[in-house]
Amino acid sequence: MKKYTSFFRLRFAMGLSYRAAAWAAVSTQFAWGVMEIAMFQAFYQAEPERFPMTLEAAVSYVWLQQAFLALFAAWMLEAEVFESIKDGNIAYEMCRPMKIYPMLFVRALAMRVSRAALRFGPVLLVASLLPGAYGLRAPQGIDRFCLFLGAMILGVLVTVAFGTLVYGITFFTISPEGLRLLVTSAMDFFNGAIIPLPFFPDEMRKVMEVLPFAAMQNVPLRVYSGDLAGAAAARAVILQLVWLAVLVAAGRIVMARAERKLTVQGG
Amino acid sequence: MRDGIFLYGHYVSVQIKSMMQYKKSFMLAVMGQFLTSFNTFLGMFFMFQRFSAVGGFTYSQVVLCFGIFLMAFTLAECVARGFDTFSSIVRKGEFDRVMVRPRGLVLQVLGSRFELSRIGRMLQAVVMFIYGMRTSGICWDMPRVMTVVFMVAGGAVLFFGIFLAGAALCFFTLESLEIVNIFTYGAREFGTYPVGVYGKHILRFCTFVVPYGLVQYYPLLFLLGKREEVWRMFAPLLAAVFVVPCYGLWRVGVRRYQSAGS
Amino acid sequence: MIMMNDICKSYHVAKRNAGFKEACRALFCREYETIKALDRVSFTIADGEMVGYIGPNGAGKSSTIKILSGILTPDGGACLVNGRTPWKERVDHVRDIGVVFGQRTQLWWDVPVIDSYDLLKDIYSISKETYKHNLEELTELLDLKELLKTPARQLSLGQRMRCEIGASLLHGPKLLFLDEPTIGLDAVSKLAVREFILRQNEEHGTTVILTTHDMQDIEALTRRIILIGKGRVLMDGSLEDIRRGGGNIDQTVARLYRDYDI
């Protein structure tokens, strides 16, 4: 276990070294958030009765999404990993005394957490200071906040587990870049990165909510504002646990196959 | 001038020839470009499944607006890709090579990258434009046709200027360039809707600071017949003036590069 | 003719200290220090001379080359190359020079070398006759015939260097800068490159300035050597002056470095 934690620390420090870019990222995310909220507000003003959540919930959804972008963003699937799988350099990684699945898992986790660690503070701070409808409200109630934290941790783990499964599948495809393209745009669409799931038509939303993509950012971002609460929230968190278990199991199986394939063919 | 255009054509032909060495990744890039914009489209499409209008604009009208804006952006991106990737040109020392050749710097940088793969996005933009054009109930006459031409051309020049300014910033810092993305890729995303929709503060910003409004919102109102003032038709030409300060910044940057080294 | 008179150049460099705490502080403020890259450098090089410009890493070699090729503007001092100040009349100046950076390519990576040459013809506006003549001559002397049809990325290092040198001589420059032209080459390619440079100098009277760490290059090619260290010219003399120290040339240079404490 210790080797994985030190591997995590190494990758974490690597992520932190992009600190100069962090300022720029914070301003970018801030501007992005303002624009997104302005858009939701425009729709809200046009037909408030058709707005599927409170405006306040939409605002907090946007700010949390921007603050924790690196945790859930689809483009954080590392092109570098795809590249090394394609040209076979991943075999070198396998010389280290680590299992490949936990290694890739830890690597992706460290990268996401380190990127987000530098960014979320300033974005949240500024967002909470904004006046009127644009501002981020403090969490209502300690229990809801705890649920939010739990759902967030699960959401990140599901995102990482899904990503690692994709890495595994990459070993069996002819075109890693193609796979990466399809997966990232599907992820963006289904996990609520483009518009939050409640905005989709009901029939569609019902299907989308049971997909693994909904177990990523969708749950924590909506739990925070209470848009997802009570029994529905409990169901969503349980679904997160289920998907996490399924994705990890599937990832390990696929990766074990891939490992065997690599050793047989010599990469 | 003619010589310059001829040389640019030669650059482009070499770029295309290079790209054709990697047909598979070219096709993937085309698909990728298509998918990112298509996701933006889907976001808007599903919003309109729920809402019937935003800021007084219907679905067809927004599709038309998005189509025109995306055409302008894609044209600029196709041509000005050298500026968009300028930080890597500086970092790799390619810019030193540009300096030791007896030609204009802008021309050489433009010639160093040409992104044909943007046709994936262009195709989408054209399809949206045609759909919007036919369904948004515009009675097409000469002034409206001219307005569309001006919107695309003025928008392309505006984005060209932004890419140029972004490249100029590379001379000062290589690290905090993500901000420029707000004005290029961010604008591409949020330019889906007419900028007037975002409220008066943002509209003011998009009029006087970075004049997206002049190539999109104001002429669009004229195009849709919501307003009749003729100046709206020519507003995009005014926006093109934005490229002048951008070029100034570029010149300052080049001078700094010459005195500070890389 | 090249004349450099009291050229000075210093850079401001952001201080970077190790450690997490320092790194966090750097987020908010930065300290700068001034580094003198060139400190009153003067020399004159006549037409047709071959000069070895040597010195340890960071001595100011590449700053000098950048100033002479018009990329960098010095802080003070005068510099004339064929009667022009390089950084003031960049375009006219670079028409007359050829630059080979040993570590970087000037060829377009994915297309056959001949396509790169054709593009260079247009960039330098070389007339058809001159181009044909120069290309034929270079093809023969550098043995490029087979290589011209090959994309640059498929060439070996030695083959590529021959093509690079060819590319920088297509427009018949009077002055050639070679920055480590033999780095990483095998013995056969090294000899071929050296032989070609000698011939070029003899037959066309091309002035050659060579920076290198390879003392055999210096012995084979140059009669005059300028040794630079810490931004100052430490010695300007002949190969014999260096040899006078006895022993082989590497040792002599190493001792000179020690004597001058650089």
Image: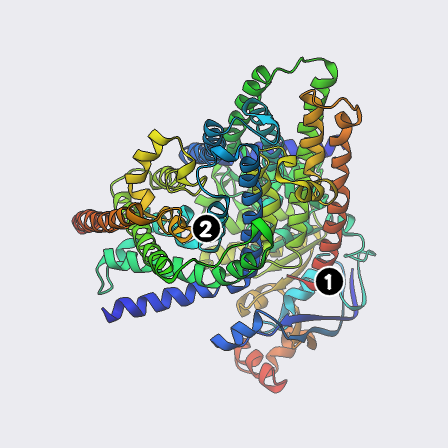
- Circle 2 chain: A
Tell me which residue sits at (61%, 58%) in the image: C178
Give percent across and percent down for residue A234.
27, 50
Q: Splitting the image into 4 quarters, where does residue C212 fall?
A: bottom right
**Mark 1 Cα-neighbour bin, 10 Å: few <14, some 14–19, many ≥20:** some
Q: How is the image coloured?
A: rainbow
**Residue C80 appears left or right of B159:** right
Residue B70 visible in the displayed image? yes
Helix, strand or loop under label 1: helix
**Residue A207 marker:** none
Mark 1 vs mark 2, foreground winner is 2
Q: Residue at 56% of width from left, 74% of height from top?
A: C25
- The residue under label 1 is which amino acid type? Ser
Q: Is residue C154 left or right of residue B159?
A: left
| Crowd around label 2: few <14 · some 14–19 · many ≥20 (10 Å) | many
Residue that appears at 22% across and 68% down: A1
Closer-to-camera residue (B168/C212)? B168
- The residue that disc 1 covers is B259
Type of amino acid at the residue the image marks with label 2: Gln
Q: Are marks 1 and 2 in contact (CB under 8 Å)?
A: no
Residue B76 spot, x, y in % from top left: 63, 35
Q: Chain of mark 1?
A: B
Q: Secondary structure at mark 2?
A: helix
Residue C170 visible within the image: no
Q: Does label 2 lie on the same chain as label 1?
A: no
**Vertical position of residue B95 compared to residue B148: above or below:** below
Residue A139 horizontal/vertical position (percent): 44, 58
**Splitting the image into 4 quarters, where does residue C125 fall?**
top right
Q: Residue B120, how many percent across, how many down?
A: 49, 29
Between the C-alphas of marks 1 and 2, the distance is 42 Å
Residue position for label 2: A65
Q: Is residue B10 left or right of residue A26?
A: right
